Image (spheres, rainbow, N blue to C red):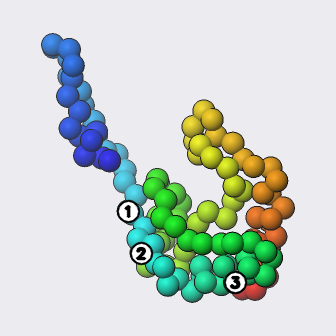
Amino acid sequence: MLGVLRDLRPVRDGATVEAEVLTSRPTWQEDPDSPLLARLAELGAALGQDVRGRHRGGAGDANLPGSRGLPTLDGLGPRGRGAHAPDEHVLVASLPERAALLAAFIASS
């Protein structure tokens, strides 16, 4: 993605385009054998929830510890769509189930 910014070219004569990367977050490589994810899936199943890991793009807060090999989970917030976009929304009905899953996970630690 950063390469796209560096490769921008002006479309008008005499114009210039400059892009400078001021900071960068490392990418978190997911671990399908994560014991944290396995525990969360087990707790979810006990609550009637289907919990699966999947890779998501973006610059989430989990990227830094995850990229350093620390056991990391992300995506425990409410369900929804459009993160950080004008159409971003939360499915209010998902709040109780997500809270129950998070509480179970914290209580089991």
For image coordinates 67% across by 50% down, the residue present is 80
Q: In the rendered view, does 3 fall on the left or right side of 41?
A: left
For image coordinates 69% across by 55% down, the residue present is 79
Marks 2 and 3 in Cβ contact (< 8 Å): no
Q: Using the image, tell me which numbered label, if any, was put on residue 55.
A: none
Above or below, comparing residue 47 to residue 20 in the picture: below
Residue 24, picture quadrant: bottom left
Q: Residues within 10 Å of mark 3 (few under 14, many from 20)?
A: some
Disc 2 is placed on an element classified as: loop
Above or below, comparing residue 19 to residue 44 in the picture: above
Most extreme residue toward the left is 13
Q: Residues within 10 Å of mark 2 (few under 14, many from 20)?
A: few
Disc 1 is placed on an element classified as: loop
Above or below, comparing residue 50 to residue 60 in the picture: below
Name the residue type under label 1: Pro
Marks 2 and 1 in Cβ contact (< 8 Å): yes
Q: Using the image, tell me which numbered label, if any, was put on residue 26.
A: 1
Q: Using the image, tell me which numbered label, if any, was put on residue 42.
A: 3
In space, the residues marked 3 and 1 are separated at their CA atoms by 29 Å
Q: Position of residue 71 (x, y in %)?
A: 53, 80
For image coordinates 21% across by 19% down, the residue present is 11
Q: Position of residue 95 (x, y in %)?
A: 80, 57
Residue position for label 2: 68
In space, the residues marked 2 and 3 are separated at their CA atoms by 25 Å
Name the residue type under label 3: Glu
